[in-house]
Each structure stands twice: as structure tokens, then as C-alpha cells.
Image (cartoon, grey):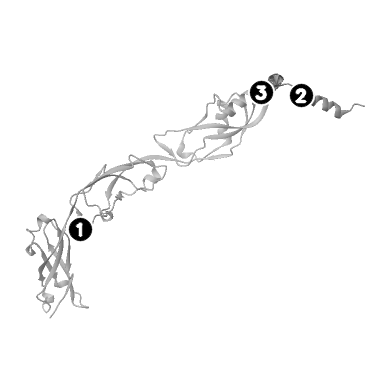
Amino acid sequence: MIDQKNIWRKLLRSLVVTRSAEFPVVALCFLAATTFWFLNALNKEYTTKITYPIEFEYNKEQFVSTVPLPSQITLNVTGYGWTLLRKTLGIDTQPIVYHFENPLKTAFITRHVLLPAVTEQLKEAKINYIENDTIPVAFDKKMQRKVALQVDNLQLELKENYFITDTVQISPDTITFEGPAQFIKELPDLLIINVPGKNIDEDYEEEVTINYTQNPLISLSSDKVTVRFRVREFLQQTVEVPVEALRLASNKLLHLPNQKVEVDYWLLPEDEPKTTAQNFGVVADLSKWNKADSSISLALIKKPDWVRNVTLRPATLKLVK
């Protein structure tokens, strides 16, 4: 009876290299055998799954996809090993192209709709079926819209006693948005820009990023604009101004006491000498008195153009009989 243990022992002993000079020979033999086996295997036919690139064609000047389109699909194919290896490694592989005839009327692509295009363009292998069941799609018309820009002056953080002395300039003063019509139509007519910086006490000219939380499908003609304005330090002044009563027949029994009100205002130092109480006018319309407490609101009807932030103290007076 043949001793199987001895046979395996002798076979393994024959594979053991006893001299270092024999290593290259054994390695070469092993490489040759592996190569022969590999080449022989590639000449056989196989059925397997491969991931294959795909591109979707449509008029990108008129339409935009509102959902991500896949860049690959999974195919069950039958073909020779050489072919399947090239396709798997992406060697000399041209993407399958699927063309949308009417994007706005297409909601999804089924495997049955996609199969003819895949079969026509991938002829080196037999397409058994497409693994992807349904590919959802959605398109909208591409639309552009210009939106005006404006700086929020109340948000500007100027140094105490400093004011802007001219018009805030924005360059460019409009931004063009482009994207799906359904989103572009929702944009505001005016976009407010927030200017960074605190305690601004000198002329400002900076590039400002437009802080717009936008849909990734919407593009802007520019995401930065240049904002310019000049600032100067102002002085605060106060003058006493007499109140003029506007009396109506219905209020003959009511009158204002002989009073004056303080008018607070801000101006540039060089305008201080020419500014007096005569530059201001304050009135009280007696027809608009509050019957509950006999009070009446005061109104500023005259002030010089070079002053700003004018306030009255007090803003109301009590009528007397």
C-alpha cells in the first residue's frame, strides 16, 4: 500500500531550495506558471458585474438638473476576460452617453429605457441587464436675474461721534444670479450687504464677500464687491428753539405755555459758526392734541441741510387752558 504521507513529504522536499543560486530559477518558474495561468484565464468567457461610467447629454444653456445625476451605472455583462479587465480598470473606456430629448418632461429613467443606449455603445460585451432599477431625474429651465445691492447703514459699526459723509458706493452695484427658474424667482429684489469692521474712523474701501446662503445650483456673477464711503468726526450741539402753535378754531380754549424746547443735533466742526437757533423750526398742531392727558407732539419743520440726527427734548408738551 502506498504511503501517502511519504509521497507528500517527498513532494514538499523537492520544492525546498537548498542553495541560494536556485532561488532565481524557482521564482522564474513560478512567474512563468502564474503568467500562463493568467493569460489562459483571460481568454475564457465570464459573467460578472462591472461599474461603468455614464454621461447625460442635454442643452446645458437652456436647462439645469436639479438633482444629482449618477456618473456610473452597474451592469451585469458576459464577455472575455481581457474585455472585462479593460472595462473594470477603465482602460480605453468611453462613457456611455444618454441623451435627453425633452428634459422637462422626464421624471425618471428605467433600466428598460436605458438598455438600448448601453447595448449600442458597449458592443465588446453582452449586456445581460442593468443593475440600477430606476434613475430619478428632474430638470428646470435655466434663468438669470440681476439683483440690486445695498449696504445696511444701521449695521455699520462706526467709532463714537463718527458719521458717513457721502453716499455709500458699491461696485458692482448689481449681481447676476443664474440657476433653476424655480429658485431664481424666489430671490429678493434687493440684497443687503453686511460690511465687516468695528470702530471705523477713517475712509473705507474694502472688498466685501456677499453673505448669501445660496443654493449650490445657483451661481453668482461675482461673490465679492468693493464698498467705499467716507467718514468724519462730528460735534454734538444743543440750541433752544421756541415752539410755534398752529391753532385751529376747535381748540380756541387751548394754548401752549410760553415754552421752548431743546434741539440736539450733530454737525462738522467747520459748520458750527453758521448754525444758530434761527436755522430750526418747531411747531405744535393743536388739532392733534391727546384728550386723555392734554399732551401734544412736537414736529420739526425746519433744519439746515448740514446737520444730522436731530432730536427734540421734550418731544411733547402739555396744553393749558
Q: Residues within 10 Å of mark 2 (few under 14, many from 20)?
A: few
Question: Depth-wise, is mark 3 or mark 2 nearer the camera?
Answer: 2
Residue on which disc 3 sits: 42
Label 2 element class:
helix
User: Image check: 24 left or right of 266?
Assistant: right
Q: Residues within 10 Å of mark 3 (few under 14, many from 20)?
A: some
Quadrant where the N terminus is found in the figure: top right
* Residue 127: quadrant of the picture: top right
- What percent of the width, then of the height, locates residue 90? 56, 28
The earlier-in-sequence mark between 1 and 3 is 3
Q: Nearer the viewer, residue 49 or 127?
A: 49
Label 3 element class:
helix
Residue on which disc 2 sits: 15
- What percent of the width, then of the height, locates residue 304? 11, 58
Quadrant where the C terminus is found in the figure: bottom left
Residue on which disc 1 sits: 161
User: Image check: 25 left or right of 221?
Assistant: right
